[in-house]
Amino acid sequence: MGSDMHITDIRLMYAYNDWANTRVLEAASRLPEALYAAKSDHSFGSIHDTLFHMLNSEVVWRTILQHGAVVQYNMAGEPSRARVRWHIFWHVLNHAMQHRSEVAHMLTQHGSSPGELDVMWFMPADGSDRVPGV
């Protein structure tokens, strides 16, 4: 096993992202609507609004990634920026982790914890990196 990142590593990281998102979404689906929409002091307020931001951002970034090796984009009120694609891949995963953690905290406060979200719970127990579907 080398130290270079390969497409299989990226697929594995995104498979983990999907697995963790699914756990959070399943936990959110168990909440009554009032708790799902309840405002909190987290960055986007409610569980709904935070999930919407997290998942919508991923769709936007995945769309932007289809436009070449160097990606040009604009942030609200900021000058245009450029990033190489792997920086965007990294950002998407990190961004999801941040907001997924916020949502997991809110869900746990409402008695609907998504359970363990650490990558170690996603990876096979035998120590391999052979995850089904990756």
Image (cartoon, rainbow, N blue to C red):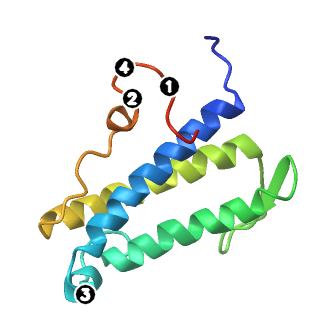
Disc 1 to disc 3, C-alpha distance: 38 Å
Nearest to N terminus: mark 3 or mark 2:
3
Of residue 128 and residue 80, the one placed in the foreground of this image is 128
Q: Say left or right for 111 vs 75.
A: left
Rendered location of residue 103, percent (x, y)? 31, 64
Q: Secondary structure at mark 1?
A: loop
Nearest to N terminus: mark 4 or mark 3:
3
Q: Secondary structure at mark 3?
A: helix
Label 2 amino acid? Answer: Pro
The residue wearing badge 4 is 126
Nearest to N terminus: mark 1 or mark 3:
3
Mark nearest the camera among 4 and 3 is: 4
Pointer 1 with pointer 2, Cβ within 8 A = yes
Nearest to N terminus: mark 1 or mark 2:
2
* Residue 83 vertical placement versus 1 (above, below): below
Please give the label number shown on residue 124.
Answer: 2
Q: Secondary structure at mark 4?
A: loop
Label 4 amino acid? Answer: Asp
Please give the label number shown on residue 129.
Answer: 1
Residue at the image position 68 percent from the left and 19 percent from the top: 4
Pointer 1 with pointer 4, Cβ within 8 A = no
Rendered location of residue 59, percent (x, y)? 63, 67
**How many C-alpha atoms fall within 10 Å of the one at disc 3: few (<14), some, or many (≥20)?**
few
* Residue 121 vertical placement versus 37 (above, below): above
Please give the label number shown on residue 74.
Answer: none
Which of the 4 image quarters holds residue 114? bottom left
